[in-house]
Image (tube, coloured by chain):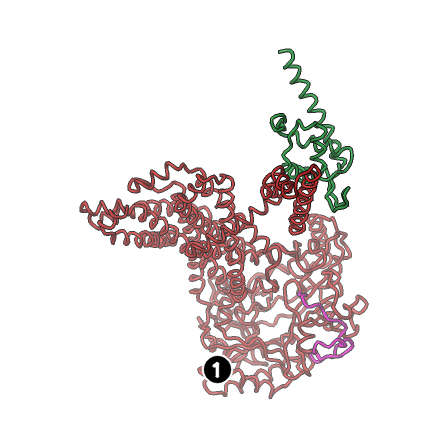
Amino acid sequence: MPSRSIDLPQGTLDLLILRTLSLEPLHGWAVSERIQQISSDVLCVQQGSLYPALHRLERRGWIKARWGTSENNRKAKFYELTKAGRRQLEIEQDAWQKLTAAVSQILETA
Amino acid sequence: MFLHDLIFRLRTLLRRPAAENELDDELRFHLQRETEKYVKSGMSEAEAARRARLEFGGLDSVKDECREARGVSLVETLGQDLHYSARTLIHSPGFTACVVLTLALGIGANTAIFTVVNEVLLNPLPYANPQELLAARPNDSLPNLEDIQRQTKSFVSSGGVNIEPMDFTGHGEPVRVHGAYVDAGLFVTLGVQPMLGRWISAEEDVKGGPRNVVVSYAFWRDFLGADANVLGRTIRLSDNSYTVIGVMPRDFTLPQQLADVFVSLWVADPSAAAERDVHFMHTYWRLKPGVPLAQAQAEMAQADRRLAEAFPDSERERATLVLPLHDWLVGDVRPALLVLFGAVGLVLLIACANFAMLLMARAVARQRELMIRAALGARNGRLIRQRLTESTLLALAGGAAGLLAAKAGITVLLALKPEALRHFNAISMDARVFIFVFAISALTGLLIGVRPAWSASRGDIGEVLRENARTTTTGISPSPLRSFLVTAELALALMLLAGAGLLIKGFLRLRSVDPGFNPANVVTMYLQLPETRYPKIPLQTNFRRELLARINAFPGVQAAMISDLPLGGNYVGHRVVIDGQATPAVGAEAEVQTLSVTGDYFGVMQIPIRGGRDFGAMDREGQPLVAIVNETFVRQLLPGQNPIGARIDWARTNEPHQWMTVVGVAGDVKHSGLNQPVDPAVYAPFSQNDEAWRRFMTLVIRTRVPLAGVVEDVKKQVWSLDSQIPVSSIQSMDDLLAVSVAQERFNMLLLGSFAALAVALAGVGIYGMVAYRVNQRTHEIGVYMALGAQHRDVLRLVMKDGMKLGVLGIGLGLAGALALTRVMVSLLFEVKPTDPTTLIGVALLLAAVAMLACYIPARRALSIHPMTALRHE
């Protein structure tokens, strides 16, 4: 399994978190699960690094946190996207798509 | 965005414990869910938990990263830095004490002076909209004031006040109080409300109006028992009953003078109120908002011209000047305060230079430690931050100690407070002062700390190791920054010393001025006869003669009376004409000081009679009118003439002359102050006076017995003649003389102590540098001595650097002093700001101090034993 997975490029974790939270508020564990599931376990997110990223995004005002009840009835900290976060997500998505498009064009033609 | 960030960090910081718990909860929840996931997939509980932890990574480092992400770490490392700095500082108490003491002296002196500057020059006056208040010069009369107010449009209101002594009786011993004779406009103009009751209204401020009085807070407290129901009570003032209608607030004072009771001039003295040509009221004006001062001045000049046309006899030479009240009040003290403020600024600079040198020495001493820490992976920025934290911590500690020093300093300042600062009673430290101190200490710490912190962090470890291996060859010359600091310190100290030297010289000159009388063993007392019981001159004369006869009967006592005492701040001025000289135009006659005497005044004061004769018993009422003039009178008004026998009189408009014959010439007396020119003066006997309003007198008593007993005996005699007469202003002539030079003494003492402080600090600075160098060169000196160097050679070697800087610093300081002492011109009495003896003197003094400061560590170099020095490595 570790042999198949790719380390996340620098700075993309924020983008993935924002994207994941754009659908619904989630707690940290669910974010990590969701990223792994959707990427079919290709991307390896070190679980520990998720939380500093969440706290950094919160400080920047892109996501906000509140305590709620989890699916198995326990107290959990849920994160949701703020308006500023939604704008930021669009900006980063845009930038990412431009970047990947440019990179793949170079890879195909050069 | 940035704001959100800041608020977020702050909130996190403020609820640290809660945030920590939340972080724990959040991560625990994650691990539990992860464990459950693995348990579901068939693992054992223990295996699942282990796996979850493994997947998660180091829990503590994740927590750390989270804290950092939340922005707590900045504050936390600051806390660590503070803790670390405090610990290292406590571990080197000598260094810390040196720095804190140096800064405390510098900052303390600054704070004390800033407090005074703040209060006197910066704080607004305690009146409503004080920027609109103007004072007019010279004084004026009420009828003129009313006319001008009517004819001008620039002013909202005007007010006048004159302080005269009043007798407060019916309350134990009769007391002389300061009576303010005012018009109703005064308090409207100043914009102050009484604390109790009300102010005198315009309707009451008329001839024959009700006798109402407003009293000061101090009078209310001391004499009326702070009675809340005092309104409506009557009190006796100068033999009249007045009804109390108001009490002024505690912090209220008139702009210039102290006053205990306020009465309407129109009510209390209607004849004086109606006199247009006697200008005795201090007047204040309130500008309409937005009216420029120039416009007000122009209107005032117009009004002056109209008055001059309407009343040519008395108002011809009007030239009323209006100026902002604040400027007017601080006019005299401003230059002195600014010079003092500049001087303490220099002291602070010197203290900072010492601080910087101490930090540099310490940085060098700790270089190895820092290198090792850097080699162990401490980041450069962090190291710099730590050094800055340390220097700022030191500076703040110095600032705190400085505040304590300032508090003591202000107490001393207030004790020395010259008359000019008297009205700024409430000199105390306020928030502005605290901000000032905090700002200068923090700035000092940051600015001074940056350089050593930076150079320490830039050090090359190899260089340090090399340096350690070969102490002998390092520092053939001292570091340029250190040399610069020592030179600057000496230059600054010399400038201060020059300023102080000039003030001291000026003060000594001033004190050596001959006042024209002998102040030793003379005590003086002021008396005023109430108008109701002494309306006529013969009654006054009887009282004076009888009292003098009784006092002169005491053994060892010699007494006389004068209307206005020299250095007492008052005199009556009259225009004078001389028989046989062309009569000048009305209003253009020379004005002379007019002094009345009873008894042997010249004998008691030991004022020499230069020509003619003294007054005698025959010079009394009904006899030929006589006068004695002073030498200045003869020089200015009777040049080249034998003054004896000349006939003089006051300028009179509608009555025949009553010529007085000059019978003698008295020596000049410095009536208005030791640093003031002598005005022409005429002395005449009280008994031949024709002005019944001069009911006041000052007893001058020369005594060979202790003063205190004499004072009590004299009071008894006064009250046995009239129990309702207050005896006041009891002071010795020596005290009066001292008070008259109090401002000069204040300047001199302050600048002198700043200069002493500066010299001490600069001495310590140069000492520190030389001592440091001796330490560094122990090995070299040892070798030198082992090779047979004489003591003299070693001394020369060690002192050479220090003395070179000393000469340079003193030279630069002299140049600076020549440029700067010019601002002191107005503070100096008969001394040029470039006085060569003073400058040479202070240069030599500072050179001696510098030499001593170099010599002490050099002595230590001599005691170095060659063998010890060589083993030192």
**Compared to B435, does B265 lie above or below?**
below
Decide if residue B288 is in sight here.
Answer: yes
**A11 on left or right of B479:** right
Q: Given the image, what chain letter belongs to the residue carrying mark 1?
A: B
Q: Quadrant of the C terminus of chain B?
A: top left
Q: Residue at x 65, y 52 (%)?
A: B17
Q: Quadrant of the N terminus of chain B?
A: top right
Q: Residue at x 44, y 82 (%)?
A: B704
Q: In the image, residue A30 lies at what x, y percent?
A: 72, 37
* Magenta extent: B225-253
Q: Which chain is green?
A: A
**Compared to B51, does B163 lie above or below?**
below
Residue at the disc numbered 1: B558
Q: Residue flagged by tag 1: what amino acid is it?
A: Gln
- Quarter assignment of residue B143: bottom right
Q: In the image, residue B483 lies at what x, y percent?
A: 38, 43
How many residues crowd mark 1 within 10 Å: few (<14), some (14–19), many (20+)? many
Colour in which chain B is drawn: red
Decide if residue B636 is in sight here.
Answer: no
Q: Toward the viewer: B600 or B588? A: B600
